[in-house]
Amino acid sequence: MGFEFFGKLLSAMLNGMVILYWAALALLLIGIARSKLERSAKVIVSVLLAGIMIGWPVRNEILLQQRQQAGRERLAKAEAIFEERCKTAGEKIYKTAEGVEGIYLVKVRKRDPYFTTNQNAEDPYGSLGDDSGDGFILSFLHGRDAKGNRSRWENDQPGYRYIETIDPGDGKRYRYTGEMRPLRAGAAPQMTFRKEPALGPMPRYAVDFEDLTTPDERLQWIGGGALRVIDLETNEVMAERIGYMVDKGLGATAGGRQPWAHARRWSCPQTQLPVSSREFVEKVLKIKEK
């Protein structure tokens, strides 16, 4: 009710401004007609004034139409590219492994506080469903509750026992081991990790992600990424998930709009909610049971 009222009020105000504009033109023309200027001067001044007063809104309308047409053409280009990319989208699982305890993360998703509005964000398609930094690592250690839902507070069904990855700060490989403990006095236990130097051989299975979009596609607000599970022993790609999305608002941020968050509405494979990397990886690398 409130938005409808203000919408009508704004419309009425705009209509009133248009009426005042043309009323002012009419009064000026009447004033010129009643002035003491010679007839030829009155005609010239009236024509010039009318030309300026009429030409300004006409010019603005032409520019508006041109901008709208350019926007439609840009959106049509983005949709055509997106539809072509979607032909390669989907999940492909070539091979699975049972009883997996730990995995190696080739990369960890970077923290980006402006991710949803950053046109050049890293792999926006894959990042929508994931945490970043330590949260990305921790997501693979989370257990599941009795209903099978992934949880940081329940561990009825364990997650991966450990994760290994390279710390970009010192270039060394570390092992992250999950453990349930309270993070502060009086708090309920939740999944966290212990970080230690990785001393043994690397895990056999690795997870990697890759941004697939070109600079031109990013200009059209298209995001695409691949998530792959790799057998490091045989150097085979065991499975891959490829997906794309496009923001049909072409990056509009008015009213607090977040382009990449809206882009998931136009994604392939189509999904209402972002799917985490952990969910896909677990289809391929079956976690060892208790």
Image (spheres, grey):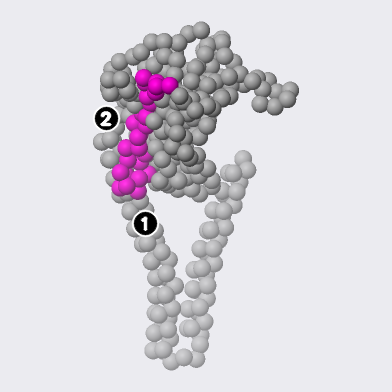
Residue type beneath disc 1 = Arg
The front one of 86 and 76 is 86
Question: What is the x, y in percent for residue 85?
Answer: 28, 35
**Mark 2 Cα-neighbour bin, 10 Å: few <14, some 14–19, many ≥20:** some
- Occupied quadrant, residue 102: top left
Mark seen at residue 88: 2
Q: Is residue 220 visible?
A: no
Say which residue appears at 33% left-offset and 29% top-offset. Answer: 242
Looking at the image, is 22 positioned above or below residue 98?
Answer: below
The one of 254 and 165 positioned closer to us in this rendering:
165
Q: On the rendered structure, is 11 left or right of 188?
A: left
Q: In what element is the residue under mark 2? A: helix
**Is residue 208 located in the magenta-colored stretch of the structure?**
yes
Tell whether 202 sits left or right of 17: left
Residue depicted at x 45% and y 46%: 118
Q: Residue at x 57, y 58 (%)?
A: 13
Q: Position of residue 117 (x, y in %)?
A: 47, 45
- Residue 27: x %, y % from top left: 52, 76
Count of numbered labels shown in the rendering:
2
Q: Is residue 214 above or below residue 145?
A: below
Q: Residue at x 30, y 20 (%)?
A: 233
Q: Quadrant of the N terminus?
A: top right
Query: What range of the chain is rendered magenta?
Result: 200-227
Classed neighbour count for the residue bearing mark 1: other residues with Cα under 10 Å, few (<14), some (14–19), many (≥20) = few
Q: Height in image: 227 above or below 30?
A: above
Residue 12 seen in the figure: yes
- Given the current orientation, which residue lies at the most extreme front position? 199
Q: Please give left or right for residue 208 compared with residue 133 in the image.
A: left
Residue linked to disc 1:
67
